[in-house]
Amino acid sequence: MLEKFYSHPLKNLNTFGFDVSARCLIRAYSVPEILQLRSDRDFACGKRLVLGGGSNLLFTSDFDGCILQPLLQNISPEDDTDARVRLRVGAGVAWDELVSRCVERGWHGLENLSLIPGTVGACPVQNIGAYGAEAKDVIEGVEYVDLDSFTVKYLSNEQCRFGYRSSIFKKELKDKAVITQVLFGLSKQPRYNTSYGSLSEMVKQLGGESLHNIRRAVVATRRGKLPDPAEMGNAGSFFKNPFVEKSAAEELRKRHPDMPSFASGSGVKIPAGWLIEQCGLKGARRGSVGVHPKQALVLVSYGGGTGGEVLALAREVCQAVRDKFGVALELEVNVV
Ligand SMILES: Cc1cc2nc3c(=O)[nH]c(=O)nc-3n(C[C@H](O)[C@H](O)[C@H](O)COP(=O)(O)OP(=O)(O)OC[C@H]3O[C@@H](n4cnc5c(N)ncnc54)[C@H](O)[C@@H]3O)c2cc1C
């Protein structure tokens, strides 16, 4: 049944842990409940936001509107054959719970994305990615409630227009769609992807390629590298790795011969963490917030800060990178 709360605290609903609140928070457990919101005064008028686990959001103030949490919890196999399974998964399922279940069942495709925080409903939004895999590699389609017409719609993988940390849900459909179900096509045949960094070496040390060993290697690496939001507020990578034209990258390499880069489509991707580090900002602290001392891509809250302070630091970082390299950084985190 729909649940509705007024002046609801959001401290436990954003991984920065900022102490802000929402004028109204609604929890919905089914598609008919979401459709019912068409005639809900709080939801139908004014500002609204769809919230998963709050692990890719920065609240800079209280939210003077209505927040909807779609909490559909199904994990339903469809078209289950010897070779593959199609899974229909509700938006409210915790992402890593899904990954863990698939690894247990021997279903291939999600293991490289182990331990990413958040919900299944948010995974198509920025096409989550890690360790050489992206959600788009296994998403067959997405069902959502269109908030203009309050009807249920479906987009195929191609129609979702997935890109690097991007999709139609971050662009044309931003704030216009409530994702309710994600359909995944998973293989039952061994199909390992250990080409990223030292993953292959770690997996070998754990006893060789298997779903369990890939998950163990990814989990161990992530725990060693990334701050745990339960201990230090953060939203993972705050910036995207910028793309530049090949010619621009060559110019930059003349001035910075040790600059790491990798070919990507028609251009070149430069690690944003390296750019930030070169500006002397790794570990920089501004009051209660800072750039993580081990991972310059991650902005952190040491407790008691505000989203505004994080945003000011993000702007300082972008300015420093632009001044030194002439490269524009784009935020990965959604600022509210
Ligand atoms: C420690 C840490 C590590 C991370 N590592 C990675 C990583 O390796 N790779 C990666 O890609 N990301 C990473 N992230 C970012 C984050 O976990 C993902 O982006 C995740 O998918 C966000 O899920 P969420 O449920 O918390 O979404 P939220 O933060 O609640 O929302 C994110 C965006 O999606 C929208 N949204 C959420 N749910 C829905 C829905 N059902 N329908 C429509 N819109 C919706 C929101 O409005 C918002 O714009 C990391 C974050 C942290 C804190």
Image (cartoon, rainbow, N blue to C red):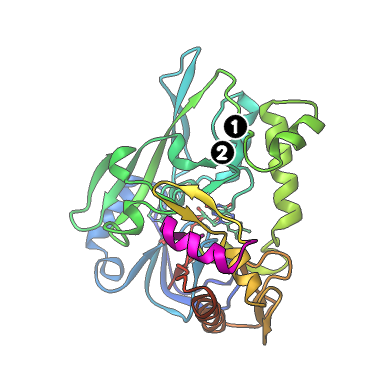
Marker disc for residue 193: 1
261 left or right, relative to 224? left
For the record, the magenta segment spans 240-258
Q: Amino acid at mark 1?
A: Asn
Count how many numbered circles sit on residues in the image.
2
Residue 233: quadrant of the picture: bottom right
What is the distance, in whole Å, between disc 2 and disc 1 at their CAs?
19 Å
Label 1 C-beta lies within 8 Å of the nearest ligand 1 atom? no
Q: Secondary structure at mark 2?
A: helix
Residue at far left of view? 149
Q: Is residue 232 visible?
A: yes
* Residue at the farthest top position: 82
Which residue is painted at 48% across and 19% down in the image? Answer: 84
Q: Is residue 202 left or right of residue 29?
A: right
Vertical placement of 256 versus 224: above or below?
A: below
Residue beneath label 2, please?
Answer: 98
Q: Nearer the viewer, residue 318 or 117?
A: 318
Assess disc 1: are there few (<14), some (14-19) or many (≥20) residues with their C-alpha within 10 Å of its C-alpha: some
Element under disc 1: loop
What residue appears at the point 49 percent right and 48 percent down from the top-left corner?
A: 263
